[in-house]
Amino acid sequence: MSSSRLPIFLASTLSLLLLGTSWAAEKPVLSNLFPPAGQVNQSVDVVATGKFPRWPLSVWSSHPSIHWECLSESGKLRSTIGPDVPAGVHWVRLYDSAGATDTRPFLVGTSPHQNEIEPNNLPSQANEVASLPQIINGTLSKRGDVDLFAVNLQGGQSLAVTVDSAKWLLSPADVSIQLLDSKGFVLAENLDHVDLDPYLEYHANETIKVIVKVFAFPATPDSTIGFSGGADWNYRMVLSPTPEPFSSTLDFESQMTLAAQRIELPAALHGTLETALPVTLPARLGGTLMEPGQKQFFSFDAKSGNHYRAKAMAREFGSDLDPTLAIYDAKSKELVKLDDAGEVRDPIVNWVCPADGTYTIGVSDFHRMGGSRYRHLTTVEQVMPSFTLSVGSELFESSVNREGEIPIQILREAGFAGMISVTMDGNPGSIQCSQGESKSGAETAGKVVLKWTGSQPFQGPISIVGRSEGSPDSRASAPRSKTVWISVAE
């Protein structure tokens, strides 16, 4: 810049400052947490990676009994997990006055935890696992990385290995596991169990030292040939002395569904339409299709015009069963048959009863296979007219005095036709938000848009609630943490 233009530049800069113009502060970005998991009633130091222009930051957790604090060094956190925190996936968000990060998952378990220690690529470097059960947090940090762990088993002892990575930790890794003996022979292996995450089990007939080998390929296929890795290729591996093929689901709602009381269908009974088990709705039934081609049936009474929903859970919690649901009338005529629900391999049948009578539901395997791992949990219930709200994002951002929008998706079920008012609840006085109205048969029947403005900086969760006379309120659910977060930057 020439000396003759320097005064003009300085004058322009001074004018901008005098007019109150300022550059927006850069918001924080959270890309990874390690370790990504901790133990109930314990504390764990966690390294956060991302971009943190300022430190310390405020920390939000989806569970109030998981307390987070920022340590003195940037990116260092400490998590203290209360005794009442349920095992499963929880969510963490960092924020300050400039904005908020996306949430990241943090898994909680009840067994002791340890982090892998590098190098552990060779059998002679395998990390020793002193006792079972044990949870190990690891990272396949570079291309070709392999992690090895040594476990001593007594004769008659079992080992179950469950890995959480792509599904719950949002890792880009497609993890595989192998179990090796001291000579490197493969005793057992698995690539996929729940989604891309593997599970295997092994029963030792004699005292033996086994090596658990963890490696991965990219979850999104590319031109890579061979094992791969990266700084965020995290995994959480559960080593247990008890086979747990159906405990891979960490979603709280699914866990509660699996744990709730149900009718257990004996494997050898109710295998034909004529021997269907009569049940009263709502019904929850568990069963195992032990033999190839086996089916299980149960019947219920239904009324003309009523809406019903049947759902079979299997793949969601790690079953080998690829379930198919069919509904039959009293004359054994097949009325409905469904294998998958969109991209989900567990079917959900929404059905309107054509006439009063007794109907039967049949559960089978799409491939006509069977065995002890072909478990299902099937539910059927009457669906009353109702509505639910959802949003496509968990984070809505704006700046002071700048208008933002929140599109609300509305699902009307069983012919619900009432007027629905949609409002933002629990927001501070600095945030003004419009009210939306959803009318059946109109463009707003399935979607409304709320417009909002913040007069002051704000960071925090809010509630979006739908109300209709004579019906229960519905709170909008967001992806991942299910909590809607409003960010008003300075």
Image (tube, grey):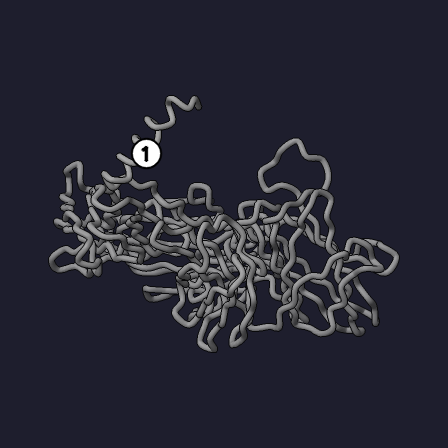
* Residue at x 63%, y 64% (from the top left corner): 238
Which quarter of the picture shows residue 7? Answer: top left
Q: Which of 120 and 243 lies nearest the eye of the viewer?
A: 120
Q: Which residue lies under the disc numbered 1? A: 13
**Does the rendering let one see residue 275?**
no
* Residue at x 30%, y 58% (from the top left corner): 461
**Does the rendering let one see residue 88?**
yes
Relative side of 144 to 33, left or right:
right
Which quarter of the picture shows residue 182? Answer: bottom right
Q: Which of 64 and 298 lies nearest the eye of the viewer?
A: 64
Few, some or many residues within 10 Å of mark 1 (<14, 14–19, 20+)? few
Q: Which of 201 and 53 lies nearest the eye of the viewer?
A: 53
In the image, residue 371 above or below residue 368: below
Locate the N terminus by quadrant: top left
Q: Which of 261 and 274 lies nearest the eye of the viewer?
A: 261
In percent of width and height, residue 428 lies at 20, 59
* Residue at x 62%, y 33% (from the top left corner): 222
Which secondary structure, mark 1?
helix
Q: Check disc 1 and give the amino acid type.
A: Thr
Q: Which residue is outermost to the front?
A: 3
In percent of width and height, residue 117 lies at 72, 61
In percent of width and height, residue 61 lies at 41, 63
In percent of width and height, residue 72 lies at 51, 64
Which quarter of the picture shows residue 372? Answer: bottom right
